Amino acid sequence: MIKRKRIHFTHAVFMLYGYAKSRILEQLRSVSFIIIYLIFFQVVILRVPLANAFGTAGGISLVIFGLAFFLEGLILGLMPLGERVGVKLPNKVGIILIALFGLLLGFGATYAEPAISALRTAGSTVTAWDSPLLFMLLERNADMLVFSVGIGVGVAVALGMFRFYYNWSIKPIILILIPMLLVITVAVSLNENTSKLIGLAWDCGAVTTGAVTVPLVLALGIGVSRASNKGKGSSGGFGIILLASAFPVLSVLILGIVLNFSTPLPTSESEFFSHASREKSLLLFDNEEHLLKHAFTHGSEDGRRAYFSDSAAYAKAINSLQDSSSARLALLGNMPISKWIIQRASEHERDVLATVNLSKIENSDSLSFGKTLLQESSNGLRAVIPLTLLLLLVLIVFLKEKLRYKDEIALGIFFTLIGMTLLTSGIRLGLASLGSEVGAQLPRAFASEEKFANRMVINNFDTLILYKGISADGTQRAFFNMIENDEITRIEFKEDQYDPKMLSYEHIINSKPLFGSRLTALGIALVLFFAFGMGYGATLAEPALNALGMTVEGLTVGTIKRTQIVQVVSVGVGIGIALGLSRILFDFPLLWLIVPSYLLLIPLTIWSEEEFTAIAWDSGGVTTGPVTVPLVLAMGLSIGGELNIVDGFGVLALASALPIITVLLFGLYTRSNQRRSIQKRIKADANG
């Protein structure tokens, strides 16, 4: 009988501290590059300080701790359950029940995916009149959107079980599925409403394959392949991530086509908010109050005037913003009035609110730390617990297996819940806000004109402090010095901004172009270079890619190194994000990039070896996870909002497509080198 050794409490704490420290430092190293890169670019290159540095830092800290707990929980809890079920299931049941379980597992894993939380909040920048169908999916039917994505992943996993069981080649599936998706995408692009859905649909395929789905589905696939004695065993588990990326695109496109029958067509802002269109507009909103809020938070003065029956009602609503906190909450929601004045108010509306004391009435748009944790813990429970119960139910009740290492698995599930809560909270409080902030500032790099940024009312203004300057042509201008943070700034005096009755001066702060009016090409090049670096750095931090890289290295017995796969995929993601961002900057259809990219993949797939084809397509699927998705999605939508682009989706889709191209090209290059080496050896042996 083995005697258990008792460990002193202090020794146990020391051991746990060392273990936890190593895991946290590992996540810190993985995310540090991209975070430092983003902050450096904004502060040093764009020369704009972080708006909420403390909140952003806190959110990033939550992401680091959340990733550490979440991944450790997966290793201790969910992954052992998935592997056990994958090995035992084929010995007990037939392929139909295996596929049914795969359907449920894929659906459950989608809801447990942290990146899905970023997709839920992506509709905040979409305007209802420009893209009614996109607004309908993201705002009114966000749960239906996630449900359809889950169905797509579930069908993909079920089909993957059939492939592993019967040892189907992955190439015919690719050569049927991808052209079908492209044909449907082209057909959808011909409709004014559904064409706006293309970017979201292809991005959904990128969002689904992250830290939860990848290890669970791979474990199940490899287990079924080996246990069925019909797969290759060593590599039969690959290819399922490809399916889990492709089928959600199909399901979202189908959902959009169905909803389009009951969705109004795009129209002008004034017509959308007019009384004549009220019945159609309310199809997208619960009531008129929500419609009015959308006019304030997303619209311009034209839309707000169109909503009201007369000018007096409009003027009353604008004035209520400075008189009533309940009115501000009803019209602006959680948007701070300072942000509304900067981003949405017209010059006339700014004049009406010129005397507003922002410091007294400011209402924060950010959720409190405690409220965010509470919401995300609830979401985590709804995501992780059903998935865990499904695995336990199949393993214990259906397969009659005894649960080994119960304490480890229980601890793993607990860690997964803690990690998911911290991770998704950090995404909302840190990563998403950082991506939005950088995205909002990037257009300054290629702007050619000044843009309103803020205003400041200076009370007790005395014109005696003015002094004059003269230019070479004899033009005189008046200036005054303003002291702010113990620093003196010279400001030009504008007569029309001075109120002699109130003795107040409204100082308008404009955001100046970063490189002046003639260097827009250099600015665009800088933005695209930044996008490449961001994609490259964010991909290096993705745990799913590193996990896949280690699996590939082990299954290929070191022929393909983990570092090689990671580097090749990271370069592909960088190129993809740069291309996606260029699509937003120049506002051309995503179709022009999606279709050629996947058409190129068809011959590359045909020429590549079976094993490497599956690895390449899976590599493209695991690039977008809890680090990349919130940053890239928030940045793309923020840039689109600044440039008045209807949507900023599609960047993630290209970040998934381009790595497949780079990996397949890398495989062809490696195979060519191997052939040359073999030929040289043969010649050397013949000559020897």
Image (cartoon, helix red, strand yellow):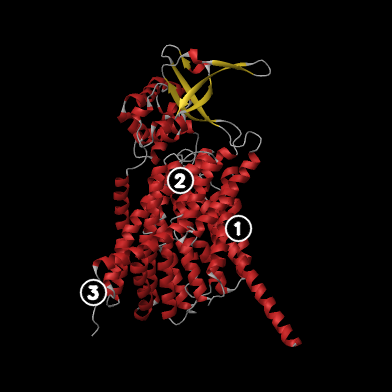
Residue at 54% in and 67% down: 563
Q: Is residue 559 above or below residue 66?
A: below
Write down the residue under mark 3. 6
Q: Position of residue 608 (x, y in %)?
A: 61, 71
Quadrant for residue 275, please give it.
Answer: top left
Q: Is residue 374 left or right of residue 192?
A: left
649 left or right, relative to 522: left
Q: Which residue is mark 1?
A: 597
Query: Which residue position holds label 2?
Result: 434
Residue depicted at 41% across the width and 71% down the height: 219
Give the x, y percent position of residue 20.
Answer: 35, 63
Between circles 2 and 3, the one closer to the viewer is: 3
- First in residue order: circle 2 vs circle 1: 2
Residue 501 x/y as whole percent: 42, 11
**Where on the picture, by quarter, is residue 13?**
bottom left
Say what amino acid the circle numbered 1 marks: Ser
Residue at x-position 33% and y-position 24%: 323
